Image (spheres, helix red, strand yellow):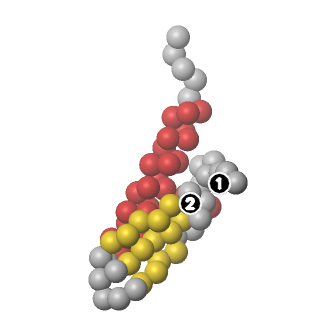
């Protein structure tokens, strides 16, 4: 089964879930990207996921631009 990533350009269409499994073991997950990021701090994993979402959206925008010939 193929998992499709979101093609939305609206950052608010992307969810970030955070899981804590101990004092220094955190993970953030974005279901729209099917991406999990691990780290040692809550804010760290949230910030890294926001950056990943922003990069994904930027890549989508770049794909939409017409190619110069």
Q: Which mark is residue 53?
A: none
Would you name the residue on which mark 2 appears? 34
**In this rendering, position of residue 23 left or right of residue 56:** left
Within 10 Å of the Cα at label 2, are there few (<14), some (14-19), or many (20+) other Cα atoms?
few
Provide residue 41's location: percent of width, then percent of height: 31, 78
Q: Residue at x 48, y 44 (%)?
A: 58
- Percent from the top left, x then y, of residue 5? 61, 52
Question: Which residue lies most toward the right here?
Answer: 1
Q: Considering the numbered disc 1 on the image, is that residue within a helix, a strand or a loop?
A: loop
The residue indicated by pointer 1 is 3
Decide: is 25 above or below 50: below
At x 46% / y 80%, what residue is drawn? 19
Of the residues under marks 1 and 2, which one precedes in the sequence?
A: 1
- CA distance separating discs 1 and 2: 8 Å
- In the rendered structure, are the residues bearing label 1 and label 2 in contact, judged by CB atoms less than 8 Å apart? yes
> Does residue 24 sit above or below 60 in this rendering?
below
> Helix or strand or loop: what does disc 2 sit on?
loop
- Foreground pick, 37 / 9: 37
């Amino acid at each position: 089964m193929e998992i499709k990533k979101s093609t939305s350009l609206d950052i608010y269409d992307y969810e970030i879930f955070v899981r804590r499994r101990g004092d220094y073991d955190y993970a953030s997950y974005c279901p729209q990207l099917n991406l999990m990021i691990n780290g040692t701090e809550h804010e760290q994993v949230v910030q890294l996921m926001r950056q990943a979402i922003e990069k994904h959206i930027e890549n989508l925008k770049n794909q939409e631009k017409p190619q110069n010939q």
